[in-house]
Amino acid sequence: MITAKARAVDGPDQSFRTAEIVRRDLDTQDVLIEIKYAGICHSDIHTAHGEWGEVNYPLVPGHEIAGIVTDVGSEVTKYKVGDRVGVGCMVDSCGDCVNCRKGEEQYCLKGNIPTYAGVDKYGEPTQGGYSSHIVVTEDFVVRIPDNIELDAAAPLLCAGITTYSPLRRWEAAPGKKVAVVGMGGLGHMAVQIAHAMGAEVTVLSQSLKKKDDGLQLGADSYYATSDPETFEKLAGSFDLIINTVSASLNMDAYFSLLTLDGTLVNVGAPGEPLSLHVMSLIGHRRSFAGSMIGGIRETQEMLDFCAEHNIAPKIEVISADEIDEAYKRVLVSDVKYRFVIDTSTM
Ligand code: NAP
Ligand code: ZN
């Protein structure tokens, strides 16, 4: 039995507390990881607050995990003790369905096993990265390139892949105009990745407060959505819009910014429904899509892409005692641009 120090929450309105959790003994294909850093994703907050439906508490969130391998099962071939590795939003899937076989394990037809708030194949609840150790089957572990620091690597495991995957799929590239809605954890990654893919990038943020950072990260222009003129000026401009906003927006206003055949991909996942008028799509043959994280192979590809292009999140490293405060700040968009927990402070 492996015990890990963790931070857990007992209900939607509760504060985090110290906890000791049990990680399973290593199965033949398992890797034991000493977690060094864990990012705080807005999804952790939606889940901890029960906004996505019922949760079994106590809950240890965290699916942006970076650490070091400290032990491996007898049949592990990909990793050895001392390797720098990451774990993202899922820790297993059936491996056998058509989507898993395509490397799209996030869309496993039997349901992927989320890193936390799920149930693993042994029938035990999964608990996430706000902890000192985790045991994961090697197929759901990725390698962190040497030139990415472990603290900066953590947010790539969710914010990085969630924006990389739709930017690849909808072909952000030279000659394409891409808008990123929301300059938070996901948004500031989308800006950097879309820029590195060669697209012309525009940020649509509530205000101009983060404009300098946006431009420095590679945006070509930056507009405030609180200014109605923004929507008039940019009407029909974008081939692709990535909406990273954690709250419900007036979608029609954003669809009006798409070109003929343009696509708006929602990665933001508010608990409440979005409303739209279908005429906003019909008018210019526009598409509205969703996208969820990315597969394991694509996650490794994203890490290697970030390493090659010197892309890293802007982070604020905090101690485990500061998680509640960090949640409050994320909720008022006061984060530049990802909180990362130093898990040695557990
Ligand atoms: P975040 O850091 O809080 O960023 C969200 C940004 O949205 C904020 O920085 C803010 O940007 C903007 N925003 C927030 N409230 C708003 C409002 N009421 N109206 C307009 N804009 C608002 O969150 P995150 O970690 O990037 O996550 C964003 C969303 O993506 C969450 O819903 C999360 O659950 C979801 N998510 C989805 C996936 C997936 O697989 N699809 C994966 C990870 C996360 P400005 O200050 O620039 O306006
Ligand atoms: Zn996430």
Image: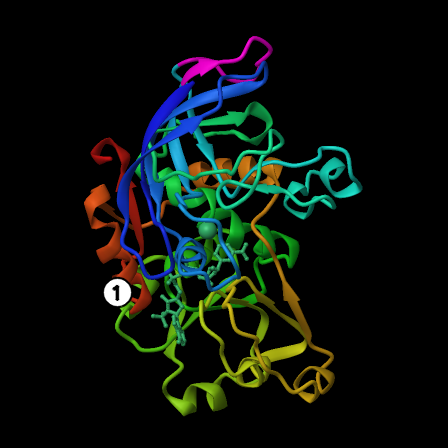
Q: Residue at x 69, y 85 (%)?
A: 278
Left or right placement of residue 64 versus residue 89 in this view: left
Q: Is residue 28 above or below residue 89?
A: above
Name which residue lies at 60% across and 56% down: 166
10 Å crowding of disc 1: few (<14), some (14-19), many (20+): few
Q: Is residue 132 left or right of residue 308?
A: left
Give the answer, above or below, for where 234 lies relative to 16: below
What's the magenta region? 70-81
Residue 346, horizontal then vertical, whole percent = 24, 35
Q: Quadrant of residue 277?
A: bottom right
Q: Under tag 1, what secondary structure?
A: loop
Q: Is residue 311 visible?
A: no
Question: Magenta region, mostly helix, strand or loop?
Answer: loop
The residue indicated by pointer 1 is 334
Residue type marked 1 = Asp
At 22% across and 57% down in the image, what residue appears?
A: 325
Q: Is residue 74 magenta?
A: yes
Question: Could you tell me which quadrant the N terminus lies in?
Answer: top left
In the picture shown, does residue 296 fall above or below 279? above
Q: In the rendered picture of this protein, how many numbered marks are placed on residues?
A: 1
Whether residue 211 sits left or right of residue 295 in the image: it is left
Identity of the residue drawn at 56% across and 50% down: 293
Residue 248: x and y in percent read 49, 76
Write down which quadrant ligand 1 falls in: bottom left
**Observer-nearest residue: 185 or 97?**
97
Whether residue 174 appears in magenta in the rendering, the answer is: no
Q: Position of residue 269 (x, y in %)?
A: 52, 64
198 relative to 117, above or below: below
Residue 338 appearing in the image: yes
Q: Position of residue 287 (x, y in %)?
A: 69, 72
Position of 256 compared to 160: left or right? Answer: right
Label 1, ligand 1: CB separation under 8 Å: no
